[in-house]
Image (cartoon, grey):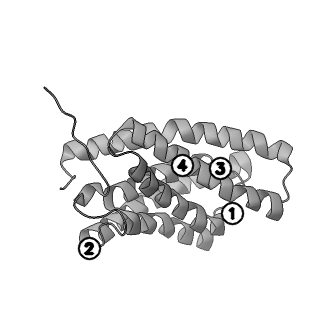
Amino acid sequence: MYTAETFNLPLAKQSLKAVPGRVDTKGIVSAVLISLAMIGLMQFGERLDTVLFGGLFPVSGRIISFTMIGFGAMMYGMVPGLIVAEINPMIATATGSSPIAPFFFITNALQAVAAILAGKLVKNVVSLKYCFVYSFLATVLLTSAYIPLHVFYFKMPWAKLIPMYAFQGALTLIIPPFLIFGLLKTVRHAGFFEE
């Protein structure tokens, strides 16, 4: 009889608690490397969002950040997840790659929080169920954070906001779970999970 393995956060050292996670050299260096990969991908995603949506609605950037920040938090826990989340906003703010780049400090941190919360709700992290719960929580948290920014700061009308939030939500609920699940399966088969 086959019994499925259950994996919990952080995957790179499952005997640790998810908060603070793996804060040794391996966890910190790995988080920085994941962050560098995210920065490279985000250079493309943020430019694409600026061309398509004026930079006010990060659609491709959100898909990339959901995938990379979620992956960092899932592999190494909260502190390394926050490292992955916060290096890109520093670069984006310094280079002015998006009009809402300073706001990424908040939204990216919320994605790391969503990964940890999803780990509390779904016991097996390496499952599509977990990936969809994470994506749902991150989408709800980010949309909740963006509403005040768009309404009060940019003074955008609801007639424009509702279709854009629906479009963003649909893409972030469908695409990142499969990307993350694929990453987790690949890393698992490569032998990077530890007890």
Q: Nearer the viewer, mark 3 or mark 1?
A: 1
Verify CB contact (< 8 Å) between mark 2 and mark 3.
no
Q: Nearer the viewer, mark 2 or mark 3?
A: 2
Q: CA distance from mark 2 to mark 3?
A: 35 Å
Mark 1 surroundings: few (<14), some (14-19) or many (≥20) residues within 10 A:
some
Q: CA distance from mark 4 to mark 1?
A: 21 Å
Kind of residue indicated by mark 2: Asp
- At which x and y percent is residue 178? 43, 37
Residue at the limit of the structure toward the left, as seen here: 1
Which of the marked residues, 3 or 4, is nearer the chain's N terminus?
Answer: 3
Kind of residue indicated by mark 3: Asp
Under circle 4, the secondary element is helix
Which of the marked residues, 2 or 3, is nearer the chain's N terminus?
Answer: 2
Under circle 3, the secondary element is helix
Residue under label 3, please give it. 49
Instruction: Classify the position of the N terminus by image quarter.
Output: top left
Residue under label 1, please give it. 100
Q: Is residue 93 above or below residue 74?
A: below
Q: Nearer the viewer, mark 3 or mark 4?
A: 4
Q: Nearer the viewer, mark 4 or mark 1?
A: 4
Which of the marked residues, 4 or 1, is nearer the chain's N terminus?
Answer: 1
Quadrant housing residue 182: top left
Residue under label 4, please give it. 137
Q: Is residue 103 above or below residue 186?
A: below
Q: Is residue 179 visible?
A: no
